[in-house]
Every structure is written in structure tokens, then in C-alpha cells.
Image (spheres, rainbow, N blue to C red):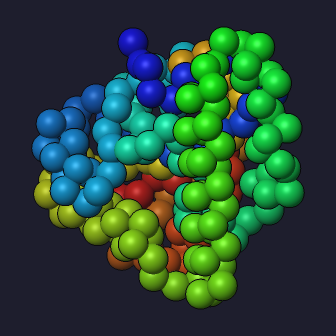
Amino acid sequence: MLGVGRIDSSDVMCTYLATTLPTTADATRIRSLAESHGLGWTAFSNRHLISQVGPGSTWYLTSRKHCDCGTALGSAGEHRSRGQDPSSHVPALKKSGWSDAKVARWLAEKSAAAARRQQEQSRGAGHTPEVDSWIGFLSSALASKATGQVGVLIHEYSGSVQGERIRIKRREPVRVADVTPERLWTMEMDVLYEFTS
């Protein structure tokens, strides 16, 4: 079902931002708004998430790349494996069948993500293009009345996005009027943030 974001080695960790909508949402309109704000919009299904949120939810990955490693969302927290050298995962990737070209792309993405994170941290918790895109998307999605709620979950996956056993720590309601760059920078891993108007 989903080729993007498939990780086949349990030794490799990649961060993804998963977004959920109620099934009553106008998914086509929301997809258009996400794309207009520079976000990807790929549907996926994970029974562990659905069992916790309910069958009335649909799930999407918002990455336009292989993964969301280095995302500004939640970057103020200590949940990232920042000190880990990505090249230490190369033997496991090759063992799982990754080609040299795919490994090189993955390493380049990890390096670029680390550089972005370093640059954003040196600026301090302020506006960045990614944070501005998310604030714009959340505001426009909820103002459009195409949905009454947008959920966002940050998780560091060690397997496929469909099969990963994810335990949501808690659900946290957030009014979109209260969303600031600092609020997005301090999001926690495995907390479902439920944005409403």
C-alpha cells in the first residue's frame, strides 16, 4: 500500500510525522491545503494507531522525503537519537537488501537533516520555513471547515509505518489560536496533538 517510509531493518530509526483526520473530513480539500503549504499527504493504515484513536480516523504521512528526520516539530525535546552516527546502520541496511545508491541517499538525507537541525537550533526557537508551513496548514485546514480537527503525532519508527507498534502516551487538545513556533518546537514524541479551531 505504501512504498514511502518503509523501513525494513529494526536497527534503523526514522522519524515520521503522522497526521490524522476524522473520517467525516473532506480529505481531498485537506490534501490540497497540505500540499499548498509544502507538506506531503500519503495515506497509510496502522492498526495500532487506529485501535487507540478509533475506527473513525484516517492517517497520513506528511513527508515529501524519505522521512521526517530533522523535523523542527518537537526538536526542542530530547527524544531524538542525535548522538547516533547514521553510518553505524549501513551494515544492517545492506543486509536487509538496500542498494549502495539507496544507502547513499539515506545517509545524505540524515546528514542534511542534522545540518538543518543544527542551523535551526542556532537561530533559537523561532520561525523556520517548516514551522511556518505547519502553522499555515493547521490554521487554513481548520478555518476551511473541511475538518473540525487535525491530529499530529511524532514517532521514531524502527519498522514499517503500517506495522509499527505505537503506544500513544496521551492525547492533548490544542486550539489552533494558541499555536506558536515554540509550541511546535516543544511537541513530545508519541503524544497525539489534536488541533481544533
Q: Residue 144, located in which quarter of the rendered image? A: bottom left
Query: In the rendered view, would you say 23 is above or below 33?
Result: above
Residue 73, given in percent of the width and then of the height, sits at 55, 62
179 or 94, nearer to the observer: 94
| Image position of 116 (left or right of 127) | right
Q: Quadrant of the N terminus?
A: top left
Query: In the rendered view, would you say 166 is above or below 85?
Result: above
Residue 104, given in percent of the width and then of the height, sits at 61, 37
Residue 132, given in percent of the width and then of the height, sits at 37, 73
Residue 109, given in percent of the width and then of the height, sits at 57, 48
Farthest front residue in view: 100
- Residue drawn at 83 percent across, 48 percent down: 85
Q: Quadrant of the C terminus?
A: bottom left
187 or 147, nearer to the observer: 187
Query: In the rendered view, would you say 13 is above or below 194?
Result: above
* Viewer can see residue 132: yes
* Viewer can see residue 187: no
Q: Residue 74, located in which quarter of the rendered image? A: bottom right
- Residue drawn at 29 percent across, 56 percent down: 38
